[in-house]
Image (cartoon, rainbow, N blue to C red):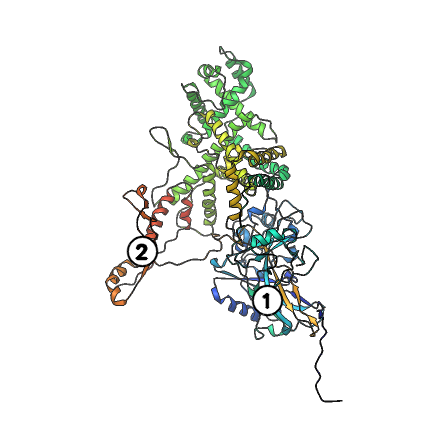
Amino acid sequence: MSGKARAIVLPADRRPGAADAAITRPWFAPERLGQRPAIFTFVGTDESFVDAFFRGVAASGPGFRAGAFPRLLPARDFAEPPRALLDGSGAPVYARAHVEPPPAERPGPGELELDGETSFEAALIEAGMGATVDAVRDEVFPPPGDASRAAWLRKLYLPMHCHFHVVACELSCDRPGAPRIDARRVIEAGLVVRRLVPDRAAARPRWQDWVASPLGGGRWVEIAGEDMKTVHGAARVVDPAALPADVFGPADVEVRRHLGVDAATPLALSTSALAPVPAAVGEAGRHTCRFGFLPLPSDKERAAPDPIDDVAVLRPGFAATAEAHLNERLVSKAAEIGAAVTGALLPLLAELRGFLPPEPPDADVAAARAAVAAVPGVVSAEIDGAARKLGLAALAHYANAELDTLPPGLARWSTAVDQVATFFLSPAPYEYPPAAPGWARDALAARGPEMSLLLRDAVHEVVKATLPAGGGLGDPIEGALLVALVVWVWRERYALLDAFYTSAFESGPAKPDFKLPVIDANGNLVRPRPTATALGQELDAWIAVNDARAREPVLWPAPSLSPGALKVHALARSLEQALIDVGAQGAGAGGGYAAELDERARDVEAALNLALGFPRLQHRALSVSAELERGLLVFPGTSPDAADMAALVAAVKKRYLIDLPAEAVRTEGKALRQVVRTRYDADSLYAVFCYARVAGKDPCELPRVVWSRRSEVFFLAEPMDMLGLKPVAVRLPDLPKLLRDVPRMKRARALPFAAMTTPQNSGVVTGDDPKDTAREWGIAWICSFAIPVFTLCAWVMFQLIFSILLAIPGFAWMLLLKICIPVPAPKKT
């Protein structure tokens, strides 16, 4: 045998490598993840989160160890899914089985910071999410088979919140008992973040991938299933570095045009690298582990070039989109929506009935009817109808807060009837609902006590008629009852908020008083009273703090609250939420939906104002733009059904096809295509998929791309999510020192200035009065101001605006977020 070396001859065509690699959870992650990558969260550690991650790996030993990594907080790192992913009935628009972890994969006590509590549910009870373990479990983990409910999901905060997330996975052989994958075979490893396509009818989860454009930005496109095999053309495993030419399928031309590239331009997925965990860290030497920072860049979707300007194309396109969206969110859920609204309304009406003066005996009612019928000119057949109309007008007065100084019961009711009579008998008659018979004037004057009794009985009958579903009330009667209901809710909420204000402002500034509207000498409304909805939103914050006061006392004393008023507020809040859930569904239907509801609201407001006479809606703290009034009086109403929903869809379609002006349609089309959308938002669900390019076991094998299963599904917190914000310390200038340092600037060669460049004809001139502020026409300027001046101006403006907002109803809750702690100053020697 010759000792001469011979060259190795490789085959011309290298064969695909054997599928011997798999990506699993790292050994230091909890077993509940199965074979999924793990996401670890570090809070407030800025760049040192990598060191904290390595310390956790080292502390884990050969397996998961509770406490090695920062624990998650139930009330912070988990939450209900985004509102945009729930339909009008509150059901998720995605298949729950596609995104929610089964019971075996839920976080365990070893991963949660329970603060001494015994379970996830107990920790949420302590945080005020419920009263019992069963109630919280039903809220957070509803039965998996219930398609009308949605479980809580993992919530990730942003780097701006000082929250940093690390993804970790491990490469192993996919044959049981085989050794780990040799780290030298891993050519590259990385991760992609994918966005869920909400589709509850899909048999399998659908995901979109972010395809970056060489020109900047990118676009979400559905190109592969959850197994990372292409959905167009032949099913192939996606190579993130080189997408196949037919990856976009029928949408290829449109997508490439949107991305600004031609058919020959190669495209790739937007990926982030995964680095190896150093072998010296813990047990890393025995594993092939990769980790990486979970990126949440502020990329933007590319605007579509050359927006379609053809109204003939835009009109049917918008109409079809609105119809499909509303059919899915509203029409298909009409029965559930109707049940939810009715179920929330009836308890509130039952409470209203108990609030009324007692229902008079039948014998007294019969005697009163006979006495009224004997008045000359009275039409006996109209007595019941007139009693209903005038009774509901009296109910609005009875529930009104202007009567809060009167005793409850019949005395207040009598005063309310007197006010109705005063308006009704005045030269400008007060009729609500309209068209009360003229003989009622004489009856009120001649038989006031008997008429009062008939009105009270009629109100009880009206409320009783609404308690069963489908009471069959006519529109005028129902509208009158709903107005009275809202006024009563306003009264009870005002009483509660007044108690909080009295307590909080006891030793501070004067307590805001918004009981009465501000009206000028001409009868014009200068400042309306806040609506019942506005009072309710602020009350939620005050009540939450009041509940926590028992555990952690605060500086001001606890107010004395009426249990009855608290119950009314809670019932009204449930009704408001049901109405809000329905009304919010039109966002995806476009401007035609908003235009349709706005016109309906104007019609309702005009009809009610005509019926009310004076004072009008806004004078009585009623506004059809508020959630409670808008939901009850405009849409969806008290008992929505499929016919109501279908009529709305038809009206929205008609607006797009006929009613909206052509210019409005063009404007909406342009905005739809050019509006700036961020790559990541708080209204979508995401998951991490890890991949690795693994070399073959011999030179004859091509490298293969292997993908992991998805991580836990998560959504992103909003930028102003308070539960994730961290304290930011800003030191204001030390004024005495600042003044001392001004003459020293030259010696110190200091230039603490910010230069502001004003382009020509772009300046602003201010006057003695804010209304004199105007654009100044002139030459360009460069003005320099010391940076401390900007800081002082911003602080002074904040103080002014903050004090103004505190005096406006609906904003006083901001006082709960103000903390001033005196800093001890050193004694001068």
Which quarter shows the N terminus?
bottom right
Amino acid type of the residue tagged 2 in the rendering: Ile
Left or right position of 419 against 225: left
* Residue 444 visible within the image: yes
SS state under label 1: loop
Between disc 2 and disc 1, the foreground one is 2
Residue nearest the observer in this picture, 568 or 385: 385
Dividing the picture into quarters, in which one does residue 579 lie?
top right
Q: Give the labeled residue for mark 1.
A: 65
Residue at the extreme right of the image, as rendered: 1
Nearer the N terminus, badge 2 or badge 1?
1
Disc on res. 782:
2
Mark 1, Cα crowd under 10 Å, few <14 / some 14-19 / many 20+, is some
Residue at the extreme left of the image, as rendered: 743
Residue 752 horizontal/vertical position (percent): 31, 62
| 789 to 426, vertically: above or below | below
Residue at the extreme top of the image, as rendered: 376
Amino acid type of the residue tagged 1 in the rendering: Arg
Residue 131 horizontal/vertical position (percent): 55, 47
Disc on res. 497:
none
Left or right position of 778 against 283: left
